[in-house]
Image: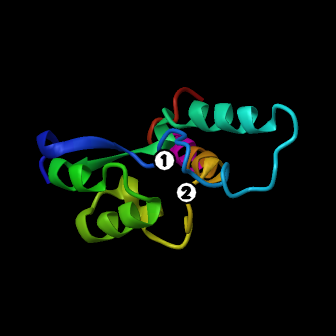
């Protein structure tokens, strides 16, 4: 896959009115729903929520569920960056999953670029 054919895909989308857990969860206490929305909005633009895909695949994956995006990744990627997204590490994609992937990416980055000792 040539680098010029790759585009960035956001794995977790911003809050929409129809998205669980906000509409299917029990009633939130005062301000809890707003805080949950703010937490989601803040984690969406992070590095761990992004990956590289071929432009055609990216267009197909756009605005789809994580399960659909994961199937497209399995079928269409060979990038090491995406290996953790293909397996059993991530059955769902939420704030907790993004934080987990963030930690994995940080550890990998430290192995590649260890800096001064």
- What residue is shown at x 58% (from left), y 48% (from top)? 98
**108 in the magenta segment:** yes
Residue at the far top in the pictured view: 116
Residue 12: assigned label: 1
- What residue is shown at x 54% (from left), y 50% (from top)? 18
97, above or below 109, in the image: below
**Quadrant (top left/top right/bottom left/bottom right) for the C terminus:** top right
Residue 51: assigned label: none
* Nearer-N-terminus badge (2/1): 1
Q: 92 or 13: which is nearer to us?
A: 13
Count of marks, rendered view: 2
Question: Magenta region, mostly helix, strand or loop?
Answer: helix
Contact check, label 2 and label 1, Cβ < 8 Å? yes
Residue 5, x across and y down, in percent: 13, 45
**Quadrant (top left/top right/bottom left/bottom right) for the N terminus:** bottom left
Q: 33 or 73: which is nearer to us?
A: 33
91, above or below 107, in the image: below
Left or right: residue 110 versus residue 85 is right
Q: 31 or 67: which is nearer to us?
A: 31
Q: 53 or 116: which is nearer to us?
A: 53
Q: Helix, strand or loop at disc 2?
A: loop
Residue 93: assigned label: 2
Instruction: For marks 2 and 1, give the CA distance.
Output: 7 Å
Colouring style: rainbow
The stretch of residues the image draws in magenta is 104-111
- What residue is shown at x 48% (from left), y 32% (from top)? 45
Residue at the far right in the pictured view: 29
Residue 92, x across and y down, in percent: 56, 63
Q: Helix, strand or loop at disc 1?
A: loop
**29 in the magenta segment:** no
Q: Quadrant of residue 31?
A: top right
């Amino acid at each position: 896959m040539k680098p010029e054919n790759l585009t960035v895909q956001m794995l977790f989308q911003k809050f929409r009115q129809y998205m669980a857990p906000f509409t299917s969860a029990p009633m939130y206490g005062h301000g809890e729903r707003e805080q949950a929305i703010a937490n989601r909005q803040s984690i969406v633009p992070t590095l761990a929520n992004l990956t590289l895909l071929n432009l055609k695949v990216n267009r197909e994956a756009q605005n789809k569920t994580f399960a659909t995006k994961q199937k497209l990744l399995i079928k269409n990627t060979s990038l090491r960056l995406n290996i953790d997204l293909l397996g059993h590490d991530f059955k769902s994609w939420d704030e907790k999953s993004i934080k987990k992937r963030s930690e994995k990416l940080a550890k990998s980055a430290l192995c590649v670029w260890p800096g001064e000792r």
